[in-house]
Image (tube, rainbow, N blue to C red):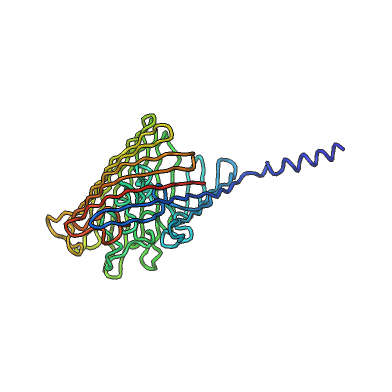
């Protein structure tokens, strides 16, 4: 009898002894209505106003002695059409595996967020989505290296193969990253994106180096991205260098956020697309309500017809945004925003704005948004 009960107890205890791994299915369902008014008007149903809609799988296994294996597979969704985002990639948001150690840090490989994405997402009151006075225009989404105007749209140039499918360095394919453990709040990270072009190992690739400090209510980061590509029309490889600095300060129920980005495009002087931008914003929570405000500025240097250098020609954008978010629960939020976008020259505040909404002499756009986000 005692042997029988002992065997049963051992069998019941065995799963707990080996329960060292976990897998989570998660996602975001975010849809919003948008009214745009400029030289013309447009009404649209869009996806991902507060956070990009997605579905993902993530997991971790405890190997013991302070070592862990992690993975993430995350695909973006266009909720308004049911299609896949990020150019239709199955796990276009991120897809990587990692070995993590509490003592030695983390090494990961796959398709991963660059620090440019992280900064414009985590240090912005309106994140880097298409809704509100967002940092999407600064971060390089859906049109090239903003504020370097639309490098993906210049047919004589190509980006590093390690860059994202839509032409920006927000997510990096074929990449390996090492992140240090935290030393009194300080961490550092280095990422290498292989271009995987035969014979161009040093001519087509991406580097991403960053350092971050978190402590005493302050979260600050600085990063340097160097994307090198050798396009078919270029005899030699040339660089795009992006320096970004951002900080967030938490005061009880409020955040103050600011950032600066400078892009230096060295690929071809005839189509130089360098530029810079900054943002200042914040939010304040009152119970379930969150109030937001942000100003974004973006300036393209030396641009003109056909993106050629024209001395004294200025292309810039200004955006002024106010937002309100009501959290029904930890998972479900209602949100709205009103944004004034002022464009000058060839600059456009948001590359997702439909063609025909502006006209010569009338480049400003007003955007009004009402949406609902649910996470699971």
Viewer-proximal residue among 287 and 92: 287
Residue drawn at (14%, 59%), measured in percent from left and top? 310
Residue 314 falls left or right of residue 353: left
Q: Is 286 located above or below residue 176 in the figure?
A: above
Q: Is residue 146 left or right of residue 193?
A: left
Q: Is residue 80 left or right of residue 21?
A: left
Tell which of 139 and 104 is nearer to you: 139
Q: Residue at x 28, y 61 (%)?
A: 355
Q: Nearer the viewer, residue 222 or 37?
A: 37
- Determine the residue located farthest toward the bottom in the rendered image: 232
Query: Where residue 315 sits in the image (x, y, percent)?
Result: 19, 54
Quadrant location of the N terminus? top right
Measured from the top left, where is residue 63 in percent x and y?
Answer: 59, 45
- For the point 27% across and 50% down, the residue is 366
Residue at x 22% of width, y 63% of height: 268
Q: Farthest left residue?
A: 312
Q: Position of residue 192 (x, y in %)?
A: 40, 54
The number of numbered discs placed on residues in the rendered structure image is 0
Give percent across and percent down for residue 218: 36, 34
């Amino acid at each position: 009898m005692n042997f029988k009960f002992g065997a049963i107890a051992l069998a019941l205890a065995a799963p707990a002894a080996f329960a060292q791994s976990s897998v989570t299915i998660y996602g975001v369902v975010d849809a919003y209505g948008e009214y745009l008014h400029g030289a013309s008007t447009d009404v649209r149903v869009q996806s991902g106003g507060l956070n990009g809609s997605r579905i993902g799988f993530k997991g971790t296994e405890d190997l013991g002695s302070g070592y862990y294996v992690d993975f993430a597979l995350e695909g973006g969704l266009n909720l308004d059409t049911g299609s896949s985002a990020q150019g239709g990639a199955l796990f276009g948001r991120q897809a990587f595996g990692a070995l993590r150690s509490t003592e030695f840090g983390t090494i990961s490989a796959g398709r991963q967020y660059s620090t440019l994405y992280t900064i414009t997402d985590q240090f912005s009151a309106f994140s880097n989505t298409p809704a509100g006075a967002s940092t999407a225009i600064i971060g390089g989404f859906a049109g090239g290296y903003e504020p370097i105007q639309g490098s993906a749209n210049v047919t004589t140039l190509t980006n590093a193969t390690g860059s994202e499918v839509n032409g920006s360095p927000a997510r990096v394919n074929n990449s390996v990253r090492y992140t240090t453990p935290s030393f009194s709040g300080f961490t550092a990270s280095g990422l290498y994106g292989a271009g995987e072009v035969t014979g161009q190992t040093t001519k087509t690739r991406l580097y991403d180096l960053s350092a971050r400090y978190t402590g005493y209510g302050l979260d600050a980061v600085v990063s340097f991205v160097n994307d090198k590509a050798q396009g078919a029309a270029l005899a030699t490889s040339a660089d795009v260098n992006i320096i970004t600095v951002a900080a967030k300060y938490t005061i009880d129920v409020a955040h103050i956020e600011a950032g600066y980005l400078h892009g230096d495009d060295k690929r071809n002087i005839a189509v130089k697309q360098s530029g810079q931008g900054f943002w200042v914003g914040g939010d304040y929570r009152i119970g379930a309500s969150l109030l937001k405000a942000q100003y974004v500025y973006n300036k393209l240097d030396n641009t003109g017809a056909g993106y050629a250098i024209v001395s004294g020609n200025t292309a810039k954008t200004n955006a002024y945004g106010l937002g309100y978010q009501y959290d029904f629960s930890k998972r479900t939020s209602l949100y709205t925003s009103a944004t004034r976008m002022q464009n000058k020259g060839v600059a456009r505040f948001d590359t997702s704005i439909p063609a025909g909404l502006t006209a010569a002499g009338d480049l400003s756009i007003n955007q009004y948004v009402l949406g609902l986000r649910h996470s699971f």
